[in-house]
Amino acid sequence: MKWKITKVFNFEAGHRVWKQNLTHGRGAELTGRDVPLQNKCVNLHGHSYTLEVTLGSDTLSEQDMVMDFYHVKNALKDLIDTMDHSFIIDVNDPMYEELKSLAEKYGAFKIFPVPFCPTAEALAKYFYDFLTQKLEQAGLLKDVKVVSVVLWETKTSKAEYRPE
């Protein structure tokens, strides 16, 4: 892509990585005997997320832009507003039904159900797919592509999704 633009968003949300098991899986052999007894991320916890979406094009519009940042913001605004201050939870999580019931009963928190374990990697792809679908629905995919989506969970931890 000759030109790229990046729009940054911030939102707050909770989640839990219910599949986390530090004693197994890719990378466990790097830790050796120092694996903590508790997998912290299986607990309910939250993040101040930063989302970076990068769009690219080999041509510019009649306004000499890849796309106006205003339109990028509006394409994601409703989704981010819905996720903001929610608890993102996998519908396959063993706690899903109970947390859903509590949310409905007390209205004290909102849940944002997804069909995957809400890791930073999976959420980055979720945002990528969502924005790509928006561009497709608007008939823009022939000129503009989602180059990458980066999701920061903390100041030191991020996940990036980019199609090959």
Image: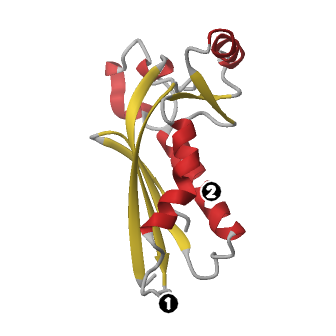
Label 1 crowd bin: few (<14), some (14–19), many (20+), radius 10 Å:
few
Side of 137 relative to 144 (left or right): right
Where disc 1 sits, the SS reads loop
Side of 85 relative to 156 (left or right): right
Cα separation, mark 1 vs mark 2, equals 27 Å
Q: Is residue 89 above or below residue 103?
A: below
Q: Amino acid at mark 2?
A: Asp
Q: Which mark is residue 104?
A: none
Percent x, y for residue 108?
A: 56, 14
Side of 112 relative to 11 (left or right): right
Q: Is residue 138 above or below residue 92?
A: below
Quarter of the C terminus within the rendering: bottom right
Percent x, y for residue 33?
A: 34, 20
Q: Residue at x 35, y 26 (%)?
A: 32
Percent x, y for residue 66?
A: 46, 79
Q: Residue at x 27, y 41 (%)?
A: 156
Residue closer to the observer: 8 or 29: 8
Side of 137 relative to 9 (left or right): right
Percent x, y for residue 21?
A: 50, 23
User: Which residue is tagged 1?
Assistant: 62
Q: Amino acid at mark 1?
A: Glu
User: Which residue is tagged 2?
Assistant: 129
Q: Earlier in the sequence, mark 1 or mark 2?
A: 1
Camera-side mark, 1 or 2: 1
Q: Residue at x 41, y 75 (%)?
A: 4
Furthest-left residue in this view: 155
